[in-house]
Amino acid sequence: MSTAPQPQTGPAPLRHRRRRVEPLYYAFLIPTLVLFTIAIPLPGLVGIFFSFTDSIGIGDWGFIGLINYRSVLDDPAVLASFLFTFGFSLATVVVVNVIAFLLALGLTSRIRFTAALRTVFVIPMVVSGIIIAFVFQFLFQNSLPAVGSALGIPFLSSSILANPDLAWVGIVIVTAWQAIPGTLLIYIAGLLSIPHEMYEAAAVDGASALQKLGRITLPLVAGYVLINVIIGFKNFLNAYDIIVGLTDGGPGTSTTSVAMAIIKGFESGDYAYQMATATLLFIVTVVIAVLQLSVSRAGGRSAS
């Protein structure tokens, strides 16, 4: 005996409908994409194109293939600028992240005047790099040598900016002084995102402050560390204004960064040659960022 199908009394199954996009969304998105493309990707692609030519920036030009890239790799001045830039970037990234993280720990702890101190520490962010460089140049060349002479300290009696072996130290100090506030804000955001209950539970279990730092704080802010390292490397590999204001690439060429070499080359008419140098710098920057992300993801998978 067959039974007739019973009518469905429940609600009909919901169908996923595609959300309608408001026209106002495109009105904001399209002009932004056009301006971004004109300002950043398009000039970059044009520069990469001309790196395969003999162009001097104006006039006629012709394709010469990889000759510019071969010349860059054989140029000891360019290689020296790359070496200085990498060493300077690595040292500055370490200094900035260590100091900023320690300051963030202090500014997120229960101390008095926390809000006022945060305001003071972020002031260097709003000051122009070239102005900071000129101020510190006066300190390194006049104030510190005067103090060193008065105290009888030979190390401080002369400007480190005039020493080819120590000028990079002054650049690291000034660059870190300007970069620490931005890194500090990111670390503060990361530390404030950690639930306070985790620290309370660790305290109940008898964990010391050092154990809380190593087993709770550092693992939970690892993503913020990666962000700061990538941003720092990207910014420091393109360092220019502070170096110009402090040493102008000297003494000699001991503190000439890749960005300085490129801009000075433009002034000399080596347009295509310097675009090849800029392209190599871009490739190296992308490779470093990809490696950093790969290491972070591998660490996250192993931790899980």
Image (spheres, rainbow, N blue to C red):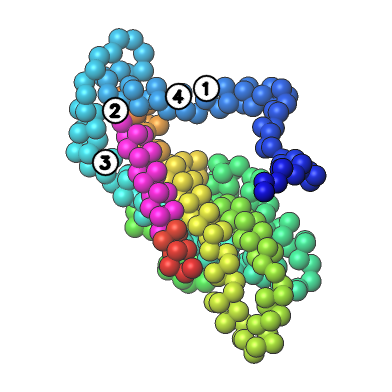
CA separation, marks 2 and 4?
A: 16 Å
**Label 1 residue SS:** helix
Question: What number is the disc on residue 273?
Answer: 2
Q: Could you tell me if the residues under marks 2 and 3 are in contact, i.e. CB atoms within 8 Å?
A: no
Label whose residue precedes the other's in the sequence (1 or 2): 1
Vertical placement of residue 265 versus 239, above or below: above
Label whose residue precedes the other's in the sequence (2 or 3): 3
Q: How many neighbours does mark 2 have within 10 angstroms: few (below 14), some (14-19), or many (20 or more)?
A: many
Observer-nearest of 105 and 22: 22
Observer-nearest of 203 and 253: 203
Q: Could you tell me if the residues under marks 3 and 4 are in contact, i.e. CB atoms within 8 Å?
A: no
**Residue ID for mark 4:** 43
Question: What number is the disc on residue 38?
Answer: 1
Label whose residue precedes the other's in the sequence (3 or 4): 4
Q: In the rendered structure, which amino acid carries the disc numbered 3?
A: Ala
CA separation, marks 4 and 1?
A: 7 Å
**Is residue 289 part of the magenta span, yes or no?**
yes
**Label 2 residue SS:** helix
